Every structure is written in C-alpha cells, then in structure tokens.
Amino acid sequence: MSTERETASTPARVRDRVGWALWRLARHEWTLVVLGSLLLAAVLTWPTLRDLTGTIPQDTGDPTLQAWQIAWGGHALLTDPTGLWHSNTFHPEPYTYAYSDTLLGYAPFGMVGDGPVAAVVRYNLLYVLVHALAFVGAYALARQLGAGRAGSAVAGAAFAYAPWKLAQAGHLHVLSVGGIALSLAMLARGHGWSLRHGYRPERVRPGWAATGWLVAAWQISLGFGIGLPFAYVLALVCLVAGAGYAWAWWRRGRRPFPRGLLLADLAGGVLFAGVALLMAAPYFEVVERHPEGRRTVAHIEMFSPPLRGFLTAPPESWLWGERHTAAREALGFPNEMTLLPGVVLLGLAFSGLFLSAWRLRHRLLLLVGVLVSVALAAGTAFLGDGDPGYATLVEHAPGWDGIRTPGRLVLWTTLLLGILAAGALTREPSGGGDVPAASATRTDGRFARWGRLVLVVPLALVLLEGVNRTPHVPVPEQPAALRGVDGPLLVLPSDGIRELHVMLWSTDGFPRMVNGLASFTPASQAEIRAASLSFPDAGSVAYLRQRGIRTVVVLPGYAVGTPWQDVADRPVDVPDVRREQVGDGFVYHLG
C-alpha cells in the first residue's frame, strides 16, 4: 500500500515542482523586465500596433526604404547570399545595398513573408521591439554596474524613450541602439566588473563575455551610422582594460584575468572585428566608385546642432513639442538638431553628481563622458571646422567621414546621464559593503513604507516625457502595373521620394530596376533618367535597350508636375515595343 501511495503521489509532486518552477520564473526580475519592456513599447509607440499593414510611423520616406532593406536582406540570404550587396535597385550598378545603412542584422525577420504588405508589417513590429530592447539593454547595464531596480528602470526608460528619439521615429537604424547597452552589460558581467564593487575575480563569467561580443557584432551589422562610434568606444574600453591588465601583471607577476576569459575576449574581439571589416568592405567599394558620395566637413556642418539644441524637443513630443516651437524655429535643421535627453533625466543626473551610490571618481568620469559626448554630438558647432575638433575625426579617423549627422551621438549622452541618474536613485547601504541585489533599493527605517513608491515617481516622469505625437501615415498601395512585373525595368516618374515607394513595391519579386534613392545619384541613373525624358521615342528606347532595360512602367498618377507627366499620352511608333494598360498604369515591353 505504501508503495502504491508513493507511486500515485509522484505525478503530484512533479506537478508541484513544475508549477513552483514556473511561478518562480514568472516572478523573476528579468521575466518582469522583459514583459514590462514589451508592454511599455506597445503603449509608448501607440498607435503602431493598431494598424500593422496600412500605416507606418512618421512618414513614407525613410521608413519605406528601411522596410525594403530588411526585406532585401532576408531575400538575398535565402536565394543568393553571394549577391547580397548587389541589390535589385540602381540597375546596373553593383554594391547598391551599401548605399546607406543596411539593417542587415534584421535579415532573419526579412525571411518571413513576401511582398510590400509583409515588409510594412515587419517594419512596424521591429519599430516596437527596438524600443523594448533599448529599455532592457540600459536596465541590464545599470543593474550590472550596481544600480537598484528603480534607478535601472529610469536608465532604461530614458535610453528607450528620450524626447530626442521622437524626431528619429522614421529612422529605425537610429532607434536600434539596445544592442549597445546590452553588449556592454554582458561584457561587464563576463569580466566580473561593476561601478559599485570594481573587479571581482570570483564573478568572472567567460560565457557572458563571449555573448557580449556576439551582441556587439550583431549591433554593428545594423549599420555604421550608430555602429562606428560604438566600435571606437569598444576599442577605447579594450585599450584601457589592456593597460590595466598589463599594469596588474607587472605589479603582481600573475595574470589578473583567467585564461578562459582571455580566450573569450580574443575570440569575441576577432569576431567583432571580422564582422566590422566584412560590413565595411562594400562601403569602401562604393566610395571608390562614387567619390561624390563621400561626406565633407562642409556637409557635416549643415547638420551640426548648436548647444541650445540639446535643450530643445522635437514637435513629436506630447509634453514639450508645442512649448518648444519657438526654439525649434531658430534651428537650421530641426529634425537632426532637437536633442533634448529629457528634463527629468537632466535633473536626476545633476543630483547624481552630489548624492549617489557611485564613487566620486566614477561620477566625475561619467560627467567627463557626458561633456565629451555632447561636444562630439555638436559636430563642428562646438569647436568649429578646424583642428582639434570634430573635423579632426572626419579627416583622420577611419570611417568617421561617413557619419553626416553628428547629433545622433547624443545617444551616448543619454546613456551616461541615465547611469548618473541610476546612481542617484540607488541608496548606498548604511553599513557599506556588498548587499544582495534584491535589497539594493531598500530605504532605511524612516522610509520603509513609502520609499519604493516614491522611487516610482521619477520613472513615471521620465516616461511622461517619452509620450509621442508621432504621425502614422498611410502606406502607398502597390500599383497593379508593378505586380509580378519582369526586370530589368524602369519606373516613371523616377525622382524624389517616389523612388523609395518603388523600392518598397519591388519587394514583390525583387525585379532588377533602375529606380532607387540614396544620398547621391550614380552617374548611370542620372543618364538613364535623362534619356527617358523623351520616352517612348526611338532614341530613348534604343538607349534603354542598350542598358539592358526590357520593361518600362509609367504611373500617370504620380507623374503630375514631373517631366514625365505626358508620357502616357505620347504615341508609340518604335517597332517591337508593346504597351498595355494595367490598372492605372502602363507597361511598355521593349522586347
């Protein structure tokens, strides 16, 4: 009987253990952080999730380009990985995928679904998820450095929802910064290092260090506009750590880091450098073939914000947008010069200089980091276009001339301010020394009842500054004439922002086409456009055939006010050219 009862009770014990394990997992700090970050992202990017297929945040410019980029990355890796960098746009030019930041790291998302609608859904979902990742990354970094939960939540909220990011709602590559903070958190954890306790050999975890390098490599695969400064920061951290390692070895006569950690760093560093070089190679090809695409100091000067821009919010800010209208009108290029990290964040960071869980020397180093990042984000507006200054980096630091908008470096200002603020909201234990992470934000007896509730107020205020008024605009519907069309083709009209719409529509099969829009115009595209002005006469048809173009699609509804507005009314007198009307467009088969 006893054996039977024990046998019968075994499933019950298993269920109890599984249930307890699931309950512990559900209540775990990181489960709550991830779920909370997703909920915050859904709310603070609303109404993105309300209409995933029909609208897109901010405008139909860069978001449609980036929807195409993600789709092309997935398509190319699935069908022809060797042709990844030679996209279907700007025919017959090579390396056209490298005409802008590629978001290649999102290519796995591009492997799911086909066509323009899927591309828009994919973009909208990523738009929400990058905000969640930014929160988790900064929260993890602050926690690893020694901050309490409340302070870390403020750092995460500020990094994910700073007012300046609202102006970048149409730039997914600028919003994709979560991997930066997350990789730094993982590297610090792997090395057993924090601001509160310094280096602790017993906390070294080589696996975390290796994972940090993997995340860093993924981050740089999203693009160099944000990734290049990150690579320089990592290089600086490695130099400082290497100098400290050599000093400790010289003084103590033994390795301060275990062999496993050194191997993880070596392998991870090689991986990171390899990914960076593989990503950079196509861009070097583009600059060599199209030197007109190189950024100059004069070009960067156009986008360099004055210092008052760091106290000005974009119009998309619900709290500050209207209040800062006059200040924005005084800026030359408001979209890239409204760089307010957050009024509450600035106040918390300032208080963190005086009252903080961080040591004084660390607070001073964070302050220096903030000032340096502001100076760099100001571009040529801070020290002018001479040496030393931002121009020095543009002219001498490899790759720095590819960053045309220095103001986006304010992301480093925001991250450092968040760490200072986290220190201000983390109470140092009265007895000093190490305390369990769960008690890092406990207050003393006088505030035991209300302390945690009070610490929620700064978080709420930071999130309030992140409430958006970002427009969500209808996505242009793919014309029937472009469905299933064969390439190489030319879509007319071919100019301006319409090119980005055509790129999005081309995700239906990815036919080769002349169309495309970048920061420069390739000579071949300019020549083909010029020849097409008289289309469909004999001279233009002969030229297009010579360039390998077999199909021309004319969209009269988009051609009004352009040199091609009467193309559909022109006679077709060239032999072997066949025209058919498909929907509101016309398809010319050149034979």
Image (spheres, helix red, strand yellow):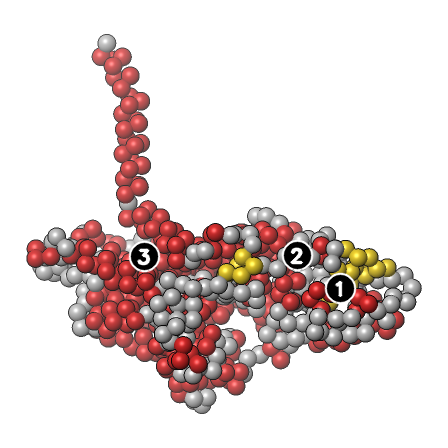
**Residues at marks 1 and 3 touching, judged by CB atoms closer than 8 Å:** no
**Total residue callouts:** 3
Percent coordinates x, y for residue 554 in the rendering: 75, 64
Q: Are marks 2 and 1 in contact (CB under 8 Å)?
A: no
Residue 478 bears which disc, if any? 2
Q: Is residue 211 visible?
A: no
Q: Quadrant of the C terminus?
A: bottom right
In the picture shown, does residue 387 fall above or below 360? below
Indicate the secondary structure of the residue bearing disc 2: loop
Which residue is labeled 1 in the image?
554
Q: Which mark is residue 140?
A: 3
Packing grade of label 1 (10 A; few <14, some 14-19, many >=20) is many
Q: CA distance from mark 3 to mark 2?
A: 42 Å
Q: Amino acid at mark 2?
A: Gln
Q: Residue at x 64, y 67 (%)?
A: 498
Question: Which amino acid, by three-letter code, is at mark 1?
Answer: Val
Q: Amino acid at mark 3?
A: Ala
Rendering quarter of residue 250: bottom left
Residue 540 versus residue 426 in the image, above or below? below
Q: Provide residue 302's location: percent of width, then percent of height.
A: 50, 83
